[in-house]
Image (cartoon, grey):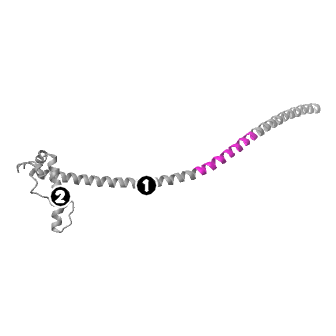
Amino acid sequence: MADAEEPAAPAEAEPEAAAAAAPAGAAVDALAADAADAPAAAAADGAVAEEESAPINASKLSAGGQGALTAAKMAMQNLDKMIAHMREKNRQVRLQMEEDAKEIAWLDKECATEQAKLDKVLAGYEEHKHARDTIETNLAKCKEGLDAVLALGKGEIKAYGQRDTRLRRTTYTHKT
């Protein structure tokens, strides 16, 4: 893997320019070499190796490789942060979906209860509507009968008044 690396860039070059000049394969090879050397070095010291605290093998890296390694580490850290954020968001969305499912079940239960009440009200409404229609029909018939009686009574009162007036005329005329 060491023969695939590019020659070292001048020390004055900026790390970004060096990272752009080095091929991607060289940076990957350097990372792989560091990853392979890190457990052996940690085991020799008797310490437990962790991904974040792995020592960097500076002798194998050129100046361009340093920038590429740093950029790759930053990219991996950012990717880890993004994945952690996405997992947390996914967990929160799943929890929200569970809460929403519970709320929907509760609302369905409430709707069923209210629908049962509404059905009772509507059944009573139909009965009352039929009773109302019957009462309105009977009231209309009673009103017609009352109007007929009043008309008859009005006619009788008028006729009585006319007879009374005639009788008074005749009575007054005979006395005088």
Task: Check residue 175 in the rendering and tell me which mark sits there, or answer none.
Answer: none
Q: Which of 71 and 145 is in front in this view?
A: 71
The residue beneath circle 2 is 36
Residue 118 inside the magenta-drawn segment:
yes
Q: Position of residue 16 (x, y in %)?
A: 12, 47
The span picked out in magenta is 115-139
The one nearer the camera, 169 or 16, is: 16
Q: Main secondary structure of the magenta part?
A: helix
* Residue 133 forms part of the magenta stretch: yes
Residue neighbourhood size for the residue with mark 1, other residues' Cα within 10 Å, grouped as few (<14), some (14–19), many (≥20): few
User: Marks 2 and 1: CB-CB under 8 Å?
Assistant: no
Of 141 and 134, the residue lying toward us: 134
Q: How far apart are marks 2 and 1 (CA)?
A: 44 Å
Return the residue at label 1.
98
Q: Residue at (15%, 59%) from the top-left corner?
A: 37
Question: Which of the 4 image quarters holds residue 56?
Answer: bottom left
Question: Between residues 78 and 110, which one lies in front from this camera angle?
Answer: 78
Q: Where is residue 131 in the image (x, y as percent from the top left)?
A: 71, 44
**Left or right: where does residue 10 sit relative to residue 84?**
left
**Horizontal and vertical percent position of residue 115:** 58, 49
**Residue at image point 38% right, 52% down:** 93
SS class of the residue under badge 1?
Answer: helix
Residue drawn 31% across the image and 52% down it? 86
Mark 2 or 1: in front is 2
- Give, as a three-letter code, the residue at label 1: Glu
As helix, strand or loop, the secondary structure at mark 2 comes to helix
Marks 2 and 1, the one that precedes in the sequence: 2
Which residue type carries mark 2? Ala
Asked where in the image residue 132 lies, by quadrant, the reply is top right
Q: In which quarter of the image is the C terminus?
A: top right
Name the spot of residue 7 as percent of width and height, x first.
7, 48
Please tell me whether residue 18 is drawn above or below residue 40 in the rendered image: above
